[in-house]
Amino acid sequence: MNDELPSDEGLAIRRLPEYQVFDRAVLHAILDEALIAHVGVLRDGEPVVLPFACARDGDTVLLHGSTAGGVLRAAARAPVCVTVTHLDGLVFARSLFESSMHYRSAVVLGDAEILTGSDRENALRVLSEHLFPGRSLEVRDHKRKEYAATLVLRVSLKRASVKISDGPADDPDDGESRDVWAGIVPLSLRAEQPVSAADVPRSVAVSASAERVVRRHRTVTD
């Protein structure tokens, strides 16, 4: 797939177009960091947006849900809009109008494909490794009925757009008083120490996979 994202009219960013990024590697990085994607679809003629666990698999994004979930089933019969946003900070400008956010966002448009058989099994392994890295080596595999109760959709990354806001808090020519503080309050997803289930014996250590997740979601200053 081309290293540059498409620039067709349907993917063009109209509000602050200078924030649009066309590097496919940036899209991949945003999706690789994501744990949740919001999926928009028409269900019975009404728009519905719901969050789903997600993971990138090459040039596709995987969405995990239940076979009982009506939204995912509707998504498999119609075009979908998959969105991921990372909120990186609040921007305190010298006016409320100019105050904003730092963020990295991706929008993927396409048709969703229901995975079955070995494709579904492979996709579930990708999802598990993304969300709980190494956990599959610590617990049993899915049972047949669990596979049957799980729905996995795959959406191509062929049509996607990326928007990034990471600029300074103030404009040197804004005419505002410099006696008013301006700056950035950084925000991030942060893991805390694992909390064992009530029935875990004291002799059982926290799993390596849980510790791995903590390390991944801890800032370098912790």
Image (cartoon, rainbow, N blue to C red):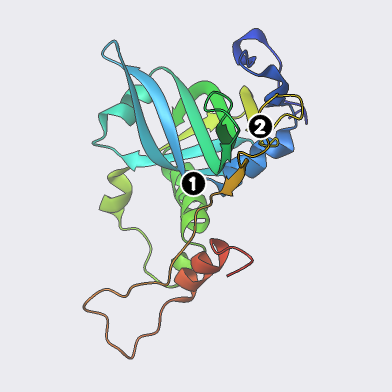
Is residue 35 or residue 66 the one in the foreground?
35
The quarter holding residue 177 reads top right
Circles 2 and 1: CB atoms closer than 8 Å: no
Mark 2: amino acid: Ser
Q: Relative to residue 118, is residue 175 depicted above or below?
A: above
Is residue 87 or residue 78 the one in the foreground?
87
**Residue 144: x and y, percent?**
30, 53
Mark 1: amino acid: Ala
Mark 2 Cα-neighbour bin, 10 Å: few <14, some 14–19, many ≥20: few
The N terminus is located in which quarter?
top right
Q: How many marks?
A: 2
Q: Is residue 151 visible?
A: no
CA distance for labels 2 and 1: 55 Å
**Residue 212: x and y, percent?**
53, 69
State the SS at label 2: loop
State the SS at label 1: helix
Is residue 35 or residue 175 the one in the foreground?
175
Q: Relative to residue 112, is residue 208 depicted above or below?
A: below
Q: Is residue 37 visible?
A: yes
Mark 1 Cα-neighbour bin, 10 Å: few <14, some 14–19, many ≥20: many
Q: Relative to residue 64, is residue 10 depicted above or below?
A: above
Query: Which circle marks residue 169 in the picture?
Result: none
Q: Give me the residue at 46% from left, 61% from top.
A: 132
Residue pointed to by mark 1 = 123
Q: Relative to residue 201, is residue 98 depicted above or below?
A: above
Query: Which circle marks residue 177 in the picture?
Result: 2
- Position of 71 with respect to 57 (left or right) is left
Of labels 2 and 1, earlier in sequence is 1
Q: Give me the residue at 62% from left, 67% from top.
A: 221
**Residue 21: x and y, percent?**
72, 28
